[in-house]
Amino acid sequence: MPREPLNFSGVHRVCKLVVLLCSLHISVTLIFYVRSFDIRLSFLQNHQRNNSSTSTDRPTQEVPVPVLDWDQNRDKNPAPAAAAPESPPTPGRVVHGICPETSPLLGLYWTESPLLRVVSYECCPGYEKIPGEKGCPASLPLVDIYHTLGVVGASTTQMYTDRARLREEIDGPGSVTFFAPSNKAWSALPQEILDALVSNVNIELLNALHYHMVNRRLTSDDLKHGSSFTSMYQDFNVHIHHYPNGIVTVNCARLIKTDQHATNGIVHVVDRVITAISNNVHSFIDTDDDLETLRTALAAAGLTTMLESEGQYTLFAPTNEAFEKIPADTLNRILGDPIALRDLLNYHILKHMQCAESIVTGMPMETMQGTVLEVGCDGDHMTLNGKAIITKTDQLGTNGVVHYINELLIPDSAKTLLELMEGSKVTTANKMFLDAGLGPHLTGSEALTLLAPQDDAFKGSLTMDGAMRRSMSNHVLKNQLSSKLLYHGQELETIGGLKLRVFVYRNNLCIENACIAAHDKTGRFATMLTVDKVLTPPMGTIMDVLKADDRFSLLTGALQTAGMTELMNQQNLLTIFAPTNDAFNALPRPELNNLLRNGQELSRVLKYHMGEGILVSGGVTSHTRLQPLLGDKLEMGMRNYIVYVNRVPVVEADMMATNGVVHAVNAIIKPLPPKVDREQSDGPASRVRSVSSRDLFQKVMKSHSSRTLTRRQ
C-alpha cells in the first residue's frame, strides 16, 4: 500500500520559534554586558576623583596611589620633566599600573579595552620599548632616590627619611648610594631600639639613616669583597663581604635587591638595619659582662693581642653560662694548661669573617686551631656542629664578627683519653677499661695510644676476670702514635708487656686481628684508635694454637703423618685455612682412611690450605687472591661479614699465632672447576663462559688491579 507524504509544517514552526527565542536571549545578554562595562568605567572614574581630591591631605611619606586617569592626575601630581607624557593614552581606554612619577623601575603601563578586553602593554613616556619584548627598560634614572625607595620595598625607609628631614639630601642634586633597609628589616628591630630611634629623629634616627648612605654612586660591581666605604655618619665605614654561595653582605646585612638606579644615585636594598662599628672584637668582648669568663681565658691564653689586631675573624663566644656547664675538674684542668686552653679558644675562632646571613647549608669551616667546625642552619637558626647553640648573631667589630653560644666547644686536642671515649661510640669499651682499673691511664698525662673496640665488637659474657683485665691492658700501647705513620711489619708494645704486629693491606690497616674503623682522635697527651674487634694477641705458634683446640685433633695428627710439624713451628709466617674434624669426617670413610695413611697425599692436600704471609679477615676483599704453598691460587671473598675461600665459608677467623694466623673451615678446600665464572668466589657457581670470555677473564686476572695478594713479613 503506498505511504502518505510527511507533513513538515509543524516542525518548521517550532524551529522558527526556537531561533527567535535564542536571538532574543543573545540581544538581552549583549545589552547587559555592555552596560556593565559602562558602570565599571564610571565607578573607576569616580573613585579616582575622590582619591585626587584628598591627595593633598595624604602624609608625605606614603607612596602615591596608582594612576587610573592620566588627565586628572597630571596636574595634581606632576611628574618630573623627563617623564611628562607627550599625549594621554588612547581615548576610551582605562589606564592601569603606574608610570615613572611613582615607579622608576617598571617603565610600563597597560591599557584595557572596555568591550574587547584586549590588553595593550606600552612604555611610559621617556622609555623606549624593547623590540620584540613585552616590557620596557628596567633601570632608567628618571626619578630621585626618595621616590625610588617607595617602589623597591623600602617605603618604611622612605617614611623615616621624611621624619628625619633627609628628603632634601636624597631627592636633590648630587650622587648618593643608599643601603636601604627593607620594610621587613624595620619590623624585625627590637621594639625598644625602634622606639629609641623614632623618639629622637633629629639625632638617633638621622645618624642611623646616614650610616646607610655613602656620598658617591656605587654599583654592585663596585662592591668588591673586603672593600670598605666611608658612610655619611662620622666617617664610619661600611664593610662588604662576598661568600662562595653568591651571597653579598654589607655589615652582615644581606643585599636582597641591587642596582636600583635613580637620578641622583643608586639604591641597594638590605634585609636588616645596619649599625655603626667603632670598636674591634676584643673591645666588644671587654665591655660585655656576659663574656667575663671568656675575657679572662683569652688573657690567660695570650690571645688578646690577636683579637685587637687587623683581620677578619669570626668568634663563637661562649657565655659565662657555657663555661659553667663544664664539669669543674675538666674546666680547671684546661684553664691550668696553657696549651689545652689555647687550643680550646682557637677552636672557637674562624680564620675568616662569617656572617649569619651567609649560611644557607651546612659547611665545614677551618678554625685557628687547625680543625674544622660544621656551621649550618636549621630554619632561621644558625647551628654549630649540628647543634642550635647560637643565641645571638652578627655582633660586629672593626676586625670581625661575634656570635654568642651557650655551650663550650672542647676540641679533641684538649681532651684526655677518657673524654675522647665519652664522645665516641665506644661506651662498652669505656666501661671495660674503667672496670679493669685502667682509669689512671685514661685520665693522666702519659703519652699513650688506646685501641678502643666498637660497641658491637664485644660478644658474649663480659665478666671482668683476670683474663679480661689482661686483654684490656693489651689494648693500651706505649707512646702516642698516629695511624698515618704505622707501617707493615711494625711491632708495638702494650702496657701489658706484649708485642703487637701491624699489617697494612690494600683496603685496611690492622693491628693483629683488629682493624682501624674510624679516624684517629688525638687528645692532649694520647691518641685513640677505634678498632672493629676485640684484639686477640698471639699466644704461641700455629701448632700450639691447633693443639689447644679439640676441633683440630685430626688435623694435628695429619700434620705429623705428613711430616709438617716443623713447618707449623718455624718462624716463616703462614696463613692456614685449618680443616676441622667435621671437615675430615665429611669425606667418605674409605677416602678418609686412605688419605690419613698416605703422608705424601696428605702433604699435597694440606699445603693447598696454606699460604705465605699473614692475611687476617679485615684484609679480604671481593677479589683477594692468595697463592698456596702448592697448587693454583685460592680465591677469597667476603659476604655478610663472612670470609669465603674457594666458596668454602670460614667458620672462625683470626686465631692469631706468633708465626701466622689460623682460619677454621668445615670442609676440605678443593680447586675450583676451570670453566666457571670465579669473579665472585663467595657466590653460587655461574654458567660456563665462552672461550673468548674466559680469555678476557684471564687477562683481567693478570692485570695490576687483580694481582695475587701475598703477604711476606
Image (cartoon, rainbow, N blue to C red):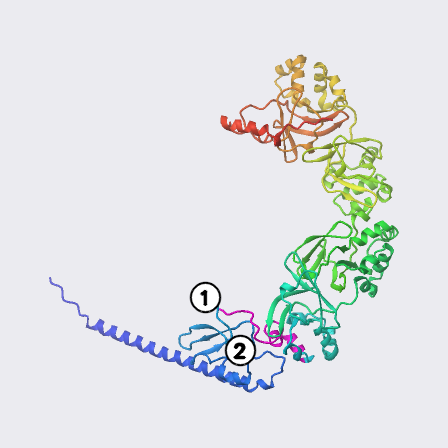
Q: Which of 644 and 68 is in front in this view?
A: 68
Q: Report the residue that reaches farthest toward the left.
A: 1
The answer to which quarter of the image holds residue 616 is top right
Tell me, yes or no, if residue 9 can be seen here.
Answer: yes
Check the image and report above or below for 455 versus 629: below
Q: Which mark is residue 83?
A: 2
Quadrant occupied by the N terminus: bottom left
Instruction: Identify the residue at horizontal 74%, vertical 69% (top origin).
Output: 236
Rendered location of residue 443, percent (x, y): 85, 44
Instruction: Identify the residue at horizontal 64%, vertical 24% (top origin).
Output: 667
In the rendered view, does 614 fall on the left or right side of 2? right
Q: Which of 607 and 536 is in front in this view?
A: 607
The answer to which quarter of the image holds residue 221 is bottom right
Label 1 neighbour load within 10 Å: few <14, some 14-19, many 20+: few
The answer to which quarter of the image holds residue 258 is bottom right
Cα separation, mark 2 vs mark 1, equals 23 Å
Q: Which of 630 and 551 is in front in this view?
A: 630
Quadrant occupied by the C terminus: top right
In the rendered view, does 120 fall on the left or right side of 588? left
Residue type (three-letter) at the residue carrying disc 1: Gly
Q: Which mark is residue 132?
A: 1
Q: Which of 320 and 399 is in front in this view?
A: 399
Sequence-first tag of 2 and 1: 2
Rendered location of residue 72, percent (x, y): 50, 84
Q: What stretch is highlighted in magenta?
A: 135-162
Q: Does the magenta stretch include residue 141?
A: yes
Rendered location of residue 343, percent (x, y): 81, 51
Number of marks: 2
